[in-house]
């Protein structure tokens, strides 16, 4: 596998966990992007301190306020990205922001189901729509006819928890709203791959593994994977993706995950 090479990238949920890991790995590439947009809810808050420190060391890192459940916030973030791009395109969109509620089947609520679905499924849909002109522009700017992440790509961070076949770790954590939202997000990835192929945009869903993050720890046991190992693996996979991979559901090592 080669090394990922992109001119511009945007990561959501970038203040901690897997999102922050992606930002760190992108900035550490041998040929790092000219601009990395790190989007998060509260850029000046306590939970974004690590991100703020990174921004102070890397002029190419641009922190963008973004609440993925708020259409007005998405519109403002897209406008800010457009200003920074100055007419050029966005090569890589990583829809990573996500939430989990630990409700069981008998205790799931309308409020939690709606909130989780809005964040994990509708958010990636709306943000991808808002940034589509920049993704199209990047694809047009790139030579060649095939699909790749260095050209233009939407990466949706999913979970094997959304696999209808596997129903992974059911005994440990039911998290019904989370599972349903990720199954729906997987269908969104398939729909995007069908709809955006003609524009030269690759679309993929990733199971990052069971990772040592706030979300990963929700199952009540220590996850086996570090953020660094998970993101490092996904970065390698991203560098090797081509037209045949668009619309697929892969894990951090590049293995196909059952829908």
Image: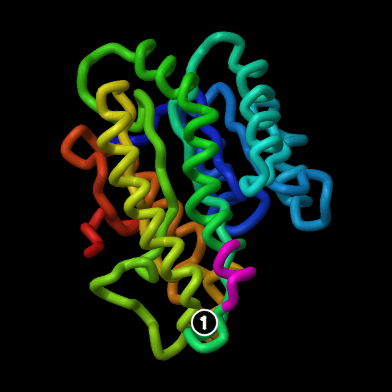
Instruction: Say which residue appears at 58% left-offset and 63% top-offset.
Output: 114
Query: How many numbered discs?
Result: 1
Give neighbour class at mark 1: few <14, some 14-19, many 20+ (Cα, 10 Å).
some
Instruction: Say which residue appears at 56% left-offset and 50% top-offset.
Output: 19
Q: Position of residue 90 (x, y in %)?
A: 49, 24
Q: Position of residue 207 (x, y in %)?
A: 37, 60
Is residue 132 rendered magenta in the image? Answer: no
Magenta part of the chain: 109-114
Task: Give the camera-side residue of 108 and 2.
Answer: 108
Is residue 112 rendered magenta in the image? Answer: yes
Instruction: Say which residue appears at 61% left-offset and 19% top-offset.
Output: 82
Horizontal relation, residue 80 to residue 195: left or right: right
Q: Which residue is label 1 attached to?
A: 219
Identify the image quadrant of the N terminus. Answer: top left
Q: Secondary structure at mark 1?
A: helix
Q: Position of residue 120 (x, y in %)?
A: 52, 56
Q: Can residue 208 be seen here?
A: no
Horizontal relation, residue 232 to residue 33: left or right: left
Residue 199 vs 50, above or below: the answer is above
Task: Give the camera-side residue of 216 and 102.
Answer: 102
Residue 94 vs 213, above or below: the answer is above
Q: Main secondary structure of the magenta part?
A: helix
Q: Position of residue 107 (x, y in %)?
A: 57, 86
Horizontal relation, residue 142 to residue 69: left or right: left
Residue 53 vs 173, above or below: the answer is above
Q: Can residue 61 be seen here?
A: yes
Task: Give the camera-side residue of 152 and 119.
Answer: 119
Instruction: Say which residue appears at 40% left-offset and 19% top-offset.
Output: 136
Residue at the left extreme, as displayed: 244
The quadrant where residue 72 appears: top right
């Amino acid at each position: 596998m080669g090394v990922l090479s992109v001119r511009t990238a945007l990561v959501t949920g970038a203040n901690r966990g897997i999102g922050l890991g992606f930002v760190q790995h992108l900035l550490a590439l041998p040929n790092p992007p000219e601009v990395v947009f790190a989007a998060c809810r509260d850029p000046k808050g306590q939970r974004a301190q690590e991100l703020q420190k990174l921004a102070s060391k890397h002029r190419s890192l641009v922190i963008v306020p973004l609440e993925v459940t708020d259409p007005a916030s998405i519109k403002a973030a897209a406008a800010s990205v457009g200003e920074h791009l100055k007419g050029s395109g966005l090569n890589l969109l990583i829809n990573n922001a996500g939430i989990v509620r630990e409700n069981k089947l008998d205790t799931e609520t309308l409020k939690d189901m709606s909130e989780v679905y809005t964040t994990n499924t509708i958010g990636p849909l709306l943000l991808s729509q808002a940034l589509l002109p920049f993704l199209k522009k990047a694809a047009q700017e790139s030579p060649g006819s095939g699909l790749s992440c260095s050209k233009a790509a939407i990466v949706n961070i999913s979970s094997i928890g959304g696999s209808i076949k596997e129903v992974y770790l059911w005994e440990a954590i039911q998290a019904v709203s989370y599972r349903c939202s990720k199954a729906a997000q997987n269908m969104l990835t398939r729909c995007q791959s069908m709809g955006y192929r003609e524009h030269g945009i690759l679309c993929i869903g990733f199971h990052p593994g069971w990772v040592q993050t706030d979300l990963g720890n929700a199952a009540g046991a220590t996850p086996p994977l570090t953020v660094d190992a998970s993101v490092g693996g996904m970065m390698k996979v991203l560098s090797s993706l081509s037209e045949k991979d668009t619309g697929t559901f892969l894990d951090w090592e590049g293995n196909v995950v059952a829908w």
